[in-house]
Image: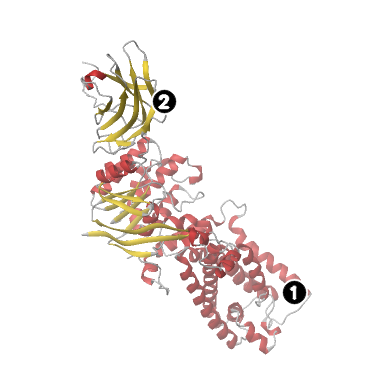
Amino acid sequence: MIKPAGRWFELNFAELWAYRELLYFLTWRDLKIRYKQTAIGIAWAVLQPVVTTALFTILFSTLARFDTQNVPYPLFALSGLIIWLFVHTSISMASSSFVNNTNLVTKVYFPRLIVPVAATLATLFDLIFGIGLLIILMLYFGIVPTPMILLAPVFIFLALVQAAAFGTLFSALNVRFRDVKFALPFLLQIWMIASPLFYPTTILSEKWKLVFALNPLTGILEGFRSTLFGTSVDWRVIGISCVSLLLLALVSLFIFKKMEDDFADII
Amino acid sequence: MQAISVENLSKLYYFGDARGYSLRESITGFFKRSADEKHDLWALRDVSFEVSQGDTVGIIGNNGAGKSTLLKILSRITKPTTGTAKIHGRVGSLLEVGTGFHNELSGRENIVLNGAILGMKRTEIAKKFDEIVEFSEIEKFLDTPVKHYSSGMYMRLAFAIAAHLEPEVLIVDEVLAVGDINFQRKCLGKMGEVSRSGRTVLFVSHNLGSLGQICNKGLLLDGGRMTAYGSIEETIGKYLSSAETERKFMLDEPDESREMQIDEVFITNAEGLLTSEVAHDEDFFLEFKTRAKRKRRGAMFCVALLNKNRERVFTEHKLVGDLMPEYADRVHVRFAIPRNFIAPNKYSFLVQIFLPDGELIHNLFDICPFGITDTGSELSAYKDYGFVQIKGDWQRISTDGGN
C-alpha cells in the first residue's frame, strides 16, 4: 500500500527486522572499504587513540593535575578517548552516509534508517580495537577490575545509542542542508570540550555537575570509567544523562522520520 | 487477480523548494512560502490503472512524461502527493543496474552486496550465485575489484544479479540499453522468460522494439497524464501517431509559371492519419496534391525514398495520364508502401514531376522526413539493420565437408 506521507511518523519494526540482512551487508561494506587504499589500514584504529592519549598525558599530567581518584592519567584519558573517538567518528561517517550513497536513495527502496545505522555499526569495529588497547594498558598498570566491570558493556551500548542517534539526525539534516558538512566538525569540537574527556567531573561544582549531566556523554564517560576502575560515581549524573539521551534519541528519530520521505526528491 | 491497482496517483515537485539545499534558503523560504508556485510541476497527474497478475506492461512516453516518477512511486522510493497504489506481493525494482556497487569491492563481494540491496535473502543469493556468475561471464575476474573491470563486464555483472531477482512484481527502467548486442539479446531473452513465468512486470524503455516483443500491455504517459492503456500494439500505435505530426510539406510560394506543381505532400498510416513515425509492420502511404494549368502528354510523377544519407532506396514512377484519364486541374494521389518491406530507419522522400524529354517541372528533394520504428521484430535488438526487410530463405545444403 503506497500512500502520501502522513502527518505523524510510523516506525515499522517488522520491516526493519525484515531488512536486517541489508543492515548487516551495508555494515560489512562500510567496514571493508573504510581502510581500503590507505597505507597503514586498520592501524589507524589504534594509532589515533594512542597518539591522543600520549598527547593528553603529556599535557595534563604536567601542566594541570586532575583528581582522577588514583586512576593513572593515561588510563583515564584512553578510556574516555575510545568512547569519544567512536562517537565522533561514527557521527561524522553517518552524517555523510546518504550524500555518499545517493544512488541507494534514488534507485532502491529499503528503510532509510539502515544507512546511518550501518555507518555507526561499522565504526564499532574501531572501538573493539580501542578496548583491546585499554585492556593492555590496564594490565600494564596492574588494575584489578571489580565486579562492576560487568556493567561496562551497558555504557558502551549507551555510547552506541548516542552515536546512532546523532548520526541519524545529521545524516538527514545533511540531505537537506549541506551546511552540516561545515557545521558538524565545529559542533563536535565544542561537544568534546564540554564532555569530561580529559578532565574528571570532580573539578566541577555540584550545581554545574548536574548541568553537565544534560550532556549524555558526561554520564556515559563517568559511568564507563567507574565500572572499569571501580571509582565512585554520582548516580544522579548517570540518571540525568540517560533521560537526556533517551529524549535526544527520540527527537533525532522523529526528525529523521519526518525528513526521510523527501530524501529521494531533494538529495 | 489484480497485482497492482493505482488510484488517482499524483506527484507534485516543488522546484523552488528542491533547490533549497542551504540553511539560509530554507530560512528565507520559510517567510515567503507559497510565493514560488510557478515552479511547481505535476510530474504525475491523476493516474489510475490496474494490472492483472502475469501482465507485462510497457510504459511509453517522451522524456519528462512521468515514466520514472511512476516507477519511483511504485517502488516506494518516493511518496505520491495524492492518490494511492496497492501492490500485491513482493516488489523488486530495477531502476538502475549496479546500485550500490562499490569499486573497491570484488565481483564476488558486489554480487552479495547488490543482491541484498535489491532485496534478496542471503540464502537466495547463495543459491543463485553460480547462475549469476555464469550469466555474467566474469568467472575469471570474480575476485578482482570491479574498478578494474571494463564497462561491459561491469554492466554484465550488474544485470546478471538483477536478472536473477525473483519478486512477484518486477519494475524495470531502461536497463537493457547496456552492453553489446549479444548481451542485450541475452537480457531481452531473460526478460521474456521472466514475463512468461507468470510474474507481473512493469517495463520502461525507449526501445519500442523490445517493448513490443516482451510486453502484452502498454501504458502511454504524456505530460504526467495517462493518455492510453491497452494492448501494447494499440498503445505503441497511439504513441507513434501522436509523435510530431507536423512534418507535412506545404508549398509556400506557388510559382505561377509552372505548368504543374505539387502543393502538399504528407505521410499517412493505415487509418488515414497524418504521421511521421510508422511501425515496421504497418502499411503507410505517401500522399500528395498537385495542380496543373493544362494537360501535358507524357508527364510523369516520380517518387523515391531517400535514406538518412539522402541516397535512393527505391524509385517508382507513374504516368500522370494513367491516374487521371480525364483532365482535371487538381489531383490528390496516394502511393502505398507495403508493411514489412522498408527496414526501421530514418527516411525522407523525393517527389518530382517531369516530362518525357527529361525536363523537371517540379522537384522536391528530401521532404517529409519520417521514421520507421521497430515495434517488435526478431531483429529489434539491432539498432540499425539496413533499409530493407527480407524474409531470407535459409537451407542446409549438407552437414559435413560438402558431400
Picture coordinates of residue A203, whole percent (x, y): 71, 84
Say what secondary structure mark 1 lies in: helix
Of tags 1 and 2, which is closer to the observer?
2
Subunit ID for the residue under disc 2: B
Picture coordinates of residue B60, whole percent (x, y): 33, 47
Asked if B282 appears above or below B146 in the picture, the reply is above
Q: Which residue is mark 2?
A: B309
Q: Quadrant of the N terminus of chain B?
A: bottom left
Amino acid marked by disc 2: Asn
Question: What colour scheme governs how the chains and residues are painted in the rendered image of this protein?
Answer: secondary structure
Say what secondary structure mark 2 lies in: loop
Q: Nearer the viewer, residue B340 or A22?
A: B340
Picture coordinates of residue A21, whole percent (x, y): 40, 62
Picture coordinates of residue A80, whole percent (x, y): 63, 74
- Using the numbered discs, state the Cα–Cα distance from disc 1 to disc 2 in whole angstroms: 82 Å
Tell me, yes or no, if residue B382 can be seen here: no
Q: Residue at x 30, y 36 (%)?
A: B278
The image quadrant of residue B261 is top left
Residue A1: numbered disc: none
Subunit ID for the residue under disc 1: A
Q: Quadrant of the C terminus of chain B?
A: top left
Amino acid marked by disc 1: Phe
Q: Which residue is mark 1?
A: A60
As drawn, the residue found furthest toward the top would be B357
As drawn, the residue found furthest toward the right would be A63
**Is residue B141 rendered to the left or right of residue A183?**
left
Q: Nearer the viewer, residue A183 or B26?
A: B26
